[in-house]
Amino acid sequence: MSTVVSLPTDVLVVDDEPVVLQVVGALLKSRGLTTVTETTGEAALERIASAGFGCVLVDKNLPGIDGLVVVRAVRKTQPH
């Protein structure tokens, strides 16, 4: 007997440039996806701690906590 696992479907987009968040958010929304945006690595880590995401798109070069730290944190807490 197989177990069906329901994975989160929201997409987290993290970038410090508002135009990137706007364009990527609009594109994902046009594809029927719910998108959450953050402008800093710190805010992204807080969001990740409180919600599940099916996909995370992160700019590598963020002020403060960079995108690689965010990706490592996601992989630990949400390995799917």
Image (cartoon, rainbow, N blue to C red):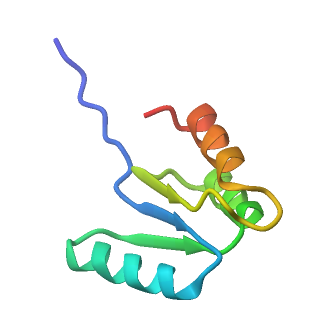
- With 14 as the anchor, is 1 left or right in this view? left
Q: Is residue 2 placed above or below 77 in the rendered structure?
A: above
Who's the residue at 31% across and 40% down the image?
Answer: 6
Q: Residue furthest right?
A: 64
Q: Position of residue 21 (x, y in %)?
A: 49, 79
Q: Quadrant of the N terminus?
A: top left
Q: Is residue 53 placed above or below 75 in the rendered structure?
A: below
Q: Position of residue 75 (x, y in %)?
A: 57, 35
Q: Residue furthest top?
A: 1
Who's the residue at 60% across and 45% down the image?
Answer: 71
Is residue 27 or residue 76 the one in the foreground?
Answer: 27
Q: Quadrant of the C terminus?
A: top left
Q: How many marks?
A: 0
Q: Quadrant of residue 37?
A: bottom right
Q: Residue furthest front?
A: 61
Q: Is residue 3 placed above or below 31 in the rendered structure?
A: above
- With 16 as the anchor, is 24 left or right in this view? left
Q: Is residue 53 placed above or below 21 in the rendered structure?
A: above
- With 41 as the anchor, is 79 left or right in this view? left
Q: Quadrant of residue 17?
A: bottom right
Is residue 11 or residue 27 the one in the foreground?
Answer: 27
Q: Position of residue 38 (x, y in %)?
A: 62, 72
Who's the residue at 83% across and 63% down the image?
Answer: 64
